[in-house]
Each structure stands twice: as C-alpha cells, then as structure tokens.
Image (tube, rainbow, N blue to C red):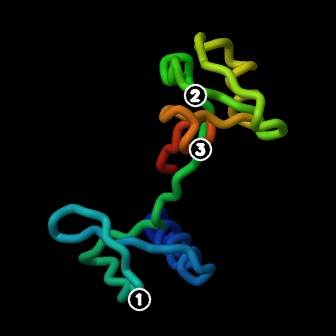
C-alpha cells in the first residue's frame, strides 16, 4: 500500500470504529455489508456505506399536478402548476411536502440521492 491508500484505509477503519457501516466489494462486483471486516486490504476493497441525502428539486424534477402543502398549516393545500425558480423550490424543500396520490401519502419536496 502506498501512503494515499493507507490514509484511505485508516479513514475507513476509523469510520467502522465510530459505528458507521462498512461494505466490501464482493466477487460479483456488488457492495455488501460486512459486519466484522477482516481487513484484507491486499485482496478486498472496502468503503464506508454511502448514505442517502435529500436535495431540492431541479426545475425538471418538480412533479407538476402534485398537491403541495405547508408544514406549518397542512390544511392549506394547492396543486403544483409550475416549476418555479430556485428560491421558491428551496422554500418548498424546507417548509412544504407534496403528494402524488391525492393526499393519501406526503413526501418531502426533493430528491433522495445517494451520497458519494
């Protein structure tokens, strides 16, 4: 291992010590949870399991026709008819939720992305 690989190994092992989930790359090239890593750095790749993070919609991702409501007053609802600008979408992200099934279920106004 070179210095950069050693630094990365230390970072991953420290994350494991701190209680984060660590994954190993399996022979079929899929990342799999490893509850007690054996730390075989010569023949196994490891990573800290990525966590999903919610981010605001882009204008192309806004679900036109969905219901939207404020978190402060959920009885106040309207239909999303435009994609709006970044400032309004940011407000939707922080203070609103939306429904695409007529109000049966409500979700944050954003997209869940896997962190890298």
The foreground one among 97 and 89 is: 97
Closer to the N terminus: mark 2 or mark 1? 1
Q: CA distance from mark 2 to mark 1?
A: 38 Å
> What residue appears at the point 52 percent right and 68 percent down from the top-left corner?
7
Dot 2 and dot 1 residues touching (CB under 8 Å): no
Residue in the image at 34% along x and 78% along y: 41
Is 47 left or right of 103, judged from the image as shown?
left
In this rendering, is residue 59 above or below 109?
above
Residue tagged by mark 1?
A: 36
Q: How far, Cα to Cα, is label 2 from label 3?
A: 9 Å
Give the label, 2 or 1, closer to the camera. 2
Question: Are the residues at dot 1 and dot 3 in contact (C-beta closer than 8 Å)?
Answer: no
> For this rendering, which residue is in front, 24 or 64?
64
How crowded pointer 3 is (Cα within 10 Å; few <14, some 14-19, many 20+) is rated as some
Query: Relative to 56, is 115 on the left or the right?
Result: left
Crowd around label 2: few <14 · some 14–19 · many ≥20 (10 Å) = some
The picture places residue 99, in percent across and down from the top left corner, at 56, 35
In the orientation shown, which residue stands out farthest toward the right?
Answer: 72
Question: Helix, strand or loop at disc 2?
Answer: loop
**Label 3 SS:** strand
- Which residue in the protein does label 3 denote? 54
- Residue 111 placement (x, y as % from top left): 53, 37
- Residue that label 2 marks: 57
In this orientation, which residue lies closer to the viewer: 82 or 41?
82
Q: Quadrant of residue 87?
A: top right
Q: Quadrant of residue 93?
A: top right
Answer few, some or many: residues within 10 Å of disc 1's Cα (few below 14, many 20 plus, some between 14 and 19). few
Residue in the image at 49% along x and 18% along y: 60
């Amino acid at each position: 291992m070179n210095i950069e690989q050693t630094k990365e190994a230390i970072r991953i092992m420290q994350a494991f010590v701190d209680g984060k989930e660590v994954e190993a790359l399996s022979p079929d090239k899929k990342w799999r949870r490893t509850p007690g890593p054996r730390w075989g750095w010569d023949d196994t790749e490891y990573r800290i399991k990525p966590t999903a993070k919610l981010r605001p919609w882009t204008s192309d991702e806004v679900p036109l026709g969905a219901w939207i409501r404020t978190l402060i007053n959920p009885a106040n609802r309207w239909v999303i008819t435009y994609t709006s600008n970044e400032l309004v979408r940011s407000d939707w992200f922080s203070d609103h939720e939306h429904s695409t099934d007529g109000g049966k279920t409500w979700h944050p106004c954003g997209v869940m992305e896997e962190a890298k």
